[in-house]
Amino acid sequence: MVEHRRLAILLSTFNGEAFLSEQLDSILQQSFTDFIIVARDDGSADRTPGILTRYAAEHAGRLFILPDEGSNLGAKASFAALMQYVLEHKSELGLARAYMMFADQDDIWAANKIEIEFKSLLLLEQGDG
């Protein structure tokens, strides 16, 4: 049985309007539900920011969007900014620890992905090295 510890799913987006809704739906329909999504748009020129805003409004308290800096950092730096944000705002996000998973904007997650991966992580944490 997975201990219900909250984790953050980090999502960096860039011109992902064709995939983003299906990706967010697959995350929001997970069997494990004690998570938040922390998203950052990396300067999209399409409707990606609007999709994120709509989902954040529909799922208040579950989806957080980093403030728009208006810059394109690239995937690596964008995910680094997301990690830094979670570490700096852990308690405000309701996280006792900084458990994080990364999500690509064009992936569709199996319904039990978080449950399986988080359980594995917690089991590794309890191991003896």
Image (cartoon, rainbow, N blue to C red):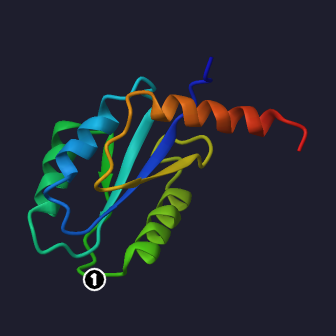
Is 112 rendered above or below residue 41?
Answer: above
Quarter of the image that includes the C terminus: top right
Q: In which quarter of the image is the N terminus?
A: top right
Residue at 15%, 61% in the rendered image:
48
Q: Which residue is drawn at 9% across and 69% down?
A: 46
Residue 41 coordinates in the image, percent (x, y): 27, 67
Local packing at callout 1 (Cα closer than 10 Å; few below 14, some 14-19, many 20+) is few
* Residue furthest right as drawn: 128
Label 1 sits on a secondary structure element that is loop
In the rendered image, which quarter is residue 59 located in? top left
Q: What residue type is labelled 1?
A: Ser
Front residue (pair 121, 71): 121
**Whole-percent x and y of residue 90?**
53, 51
> On the picture, is 125 further left or further right than 80?
right
- What residue is drawn where x is 14% and y is 53%? 51
Q: In this view, does 82 lie above or below 31?
A: below
Which quarter of the figure has residue 27?
A: top left
Q: In this view, does 50 lie above or below 28?
A: below
Residue 105: give x, y in percent of width and height: 30, 56
Residue behind mark 1:
71
* 54 to the left or right of 80: left
How far across and down, in percent of the image, does residue 80 sit?
49, 70
